[in-house]
Image (cartoon, rainbow, N blue to C red):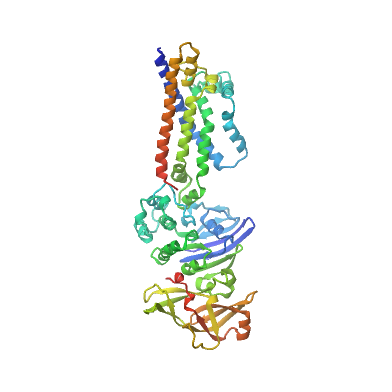
Amino acid sequence: MTADSAAWEALRLSLWVAGWATVLAVPLALWVAWILARKSFWGKSLLNAVVHLPLVLPPVVTGYLLLISFSPNAPMGQALSAMGLQLAFHWTGAVLAAIVMGFPLMVRAMRLAIEAVDPKLEEAAETLGAGRISVFARVTLPLIGPGILAGAVMGFAKAMGEFGATITFVANIPGQTQTLPGAIWAALQIPGGEGQAVTMVLMASAVAVAAVLLSEVLARRVSARIAAK
Amino acid sequence: MTLQVEIKHQLGGLSLKVGFEAAGGITAIFGRSGTGKTTVINAVAGLLRPDAGRVSLGGDVFVDTASGRFVPPAKRRLGYVFQDARLFPHLTVRDNLTFGARYAPPGAQGAGLDDVVALLGLAPLMARRPGTLSGGEKQRVAIGRALLSRPRMLLMDEPLASLDAPRKQEILPYLERLRDGPLNLPILYVSHAVDEVARLADRLVLLQDGKVQAQGPLYDVMADPAAVPLLGVREAGAVIEAEVIAHADDGLSTLRISAGTLELPGVQADVGARVRLRVLAQDVILSLSRPEGLSSVNVLPVRVETVHAGGGPGAAIGLRAGKDRVLARVTARAVAEMQLAPGLDCYAILKATTVAPGSIGR
């Protein structure tokens, strides 16, 4: 394998892992953000703390906790592999690590957006005959769209850059779990690997900038639809 | 179709206990801030669950705490116009207007989009978004949006309170058209402005400290001396109906009421039109003999019906003028010196300026 194709392989895997992580995490993050913003229940502070834990814990610790929870010997790992899903030392584990690490950022952005929606608008929709699902689909969702988008972009960017938890949980196997940050780190361990590292640094930077630009364009489109309040 | 409300609700320090009925036309709930008006209308709409009581419209029971019945707002089919319009910021005026149409049952009676757009003058606004509308325009869209959900009744919570005087004047004619037009939709109208109520309402419910203090046809309640402290001594006064019979070149118009004619300035209505006059109680002067040589030309023969002495130096006098009732506010000393008592015939002098131009209307 040439140095360049190894870099492209790492980029492909990073996009794949980050894409899956984002797609899987957005609905869950939206749901958690919703109950944190709108519901009051026993244990709410605890849920909030657990969601935010990956933000404050050292990533290596988060990765270690994932490893002992989902290793093939652990009960959860056994249950999942019985269902044909292997996580440890596998790209799916990298997806899980990316979800866990990006989750607090997603929930924060979405929660702020939900809290900014005036419940009086939803009441107005109800008096016009709209049931709960219609109110959410026709009033709430369009209003929190930019927040969901911002959360998704942050989660995607976090997944692209995730290193500590990933390498602890699923190691750094080229073509399997070696995403861009892992590949850059590995290249820098080899004498004369700086050239390859620079290539991948440029790739990672390009993806990051592209993600931010894309989200700007989408957000502008959404807010143009919503117009000035 | 009659709305029947009988509710009890504890709201902070206010214990609300309200019972009233509303049928056709505009029923106004009048009260100062903090008397529980919005709580009542929200309980009717379903945005609030009363602690106890029953709310029904026609044969449909919306709330019955005895049987645990509660119909959610989406199933009540009541159009609600909020004080703050509450238009959906992400939708155009057109999409705001048609928001509720799909939820109305197929056979629901009501106005079509074209009718409502014409009634409320919305044609130039259709493609715009709420963020670019003025307060008055927003409120017109909000009224249209409620109408187009094909409601069985319209609820309005201080729809004019957040507007300045010119914007109010802009909306009032639309509300009058709604009342007098072919839609024939019953309206429950919450307000703390006597002039709005006097101009719009057919029935009046006076609320104070969470209790109904008086209710009945507008003309009766406004002419009731006991209602003076509830409406405020400066605002209290009878509402009477008049017909415009002539406009003179000097700006005065002649209006006929059951007890005679009045000369008033600033009447906008056409000859032949029926208008409402508001005669403020504090602007009516009583005289035992027919007055001569006055600068006011409006003198009506009246008979004293009730004398209602308040706690202060003033007294409210209920008067019969032909078929109409008029209210006068005089001092307690005048009551004693003139020996005002039920059955006494005397004369009421109305200054022509007693009827504010803004409160003359159909």
Does residue A171 sit above or below B161 in this rendering? Answer: above
Most foreground residue, B134 or A164: B134
Does residue A12 appear left or right of residue B5 in this picture? Answer: left
Residue drawn where x is 47% and y is 29% of the image: A156
Residue drawn where x is 63% and y is 81% of the image: B333
Which residue lies most toward the top here? A191
Most foreground residue, A123 or B105: A123
Q: Which quadrant, please, contains the C terminus of chain B?
A: bottom left
Residue A21: % across, % down: 48, 28
Residue A4: % across, % down: 40, 16
Image-quadrant location for residue B281: bottom right
Does residue B190 sit above or below B275 in this rendering? Answer: above
The total of numbered circles placed on residues is 0
Image-quadrant location for residue A149: top left
Confirm whether residue B99 shows in the render: no
Residue drawn where x is 47% and y is 41% of the image: A144
Does residue A172 sit above or below B351 in this rendering? Answer: above
Residue B231: % across, % down: 56, 69
Confirm whether residue B289 shows in the render: yes
Residue A66: % across, % down: 56, 23
Most foreground residue, A66 or A148: A148
Does residue A157 appear left or right of residue B340 in this picture? Answer: left
